[in-house]
Image (spheres, helix red, strand yellow):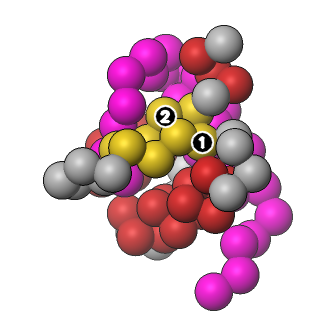
Amino acid sequence: MRIRRGEFERIRSVLEQADADEPLTAREILDLLDEHGEDFDSAHRVATVLGRRARDGDVEVIRDQPYRYRFREANN
């Protein structure tokens, strides 16, 4: 599955607007995206996008049940 251009930026933008300062699950992020009019296929898609960006250090994945995600840039 290929990440479509702009998905990460759309997620980051909504989380910045929502002033999300604590780690969120993919489902919570999907709900915020929906509230802000951003259409994403599923929580799985959100997790895929964020998991891939975690490899670059842009996102911290907190490996708990359920996984939670925190943007490194948004908190610095």
Q: Secondary structure at mark 2?
A: strand
Contact between labelled residues 2 and 1, with CB atoms less than 8 Å apart: yes
- Vertical side of 58 occupied by 63: above or below: below
Mark toward the start of the polypeptide (1 vs 2): 1
Q: Residue at the location (69% across, 43% down)? A: 57
Q: Residue at the location (46% across, 47% down)? A: 61
Q: Position of residue 54 (x, y in %)?
A: 62, 52
Which region of the structure is painted magenta? Answer: 1-26
Farthest residue to the left: give it: 65
Which mark, residue 75?
A: none
Q: Which residue is mark 1?
A: 59
Which mark, residue 70?
A: 2
What amino acid does circle 1 point to? Val
**Taking the image as drawn, is residue 29 in sight?**
no
Q: Position of residue 40 (x, y in %)?
A: 50, 63
27 to the left or right of 69: left
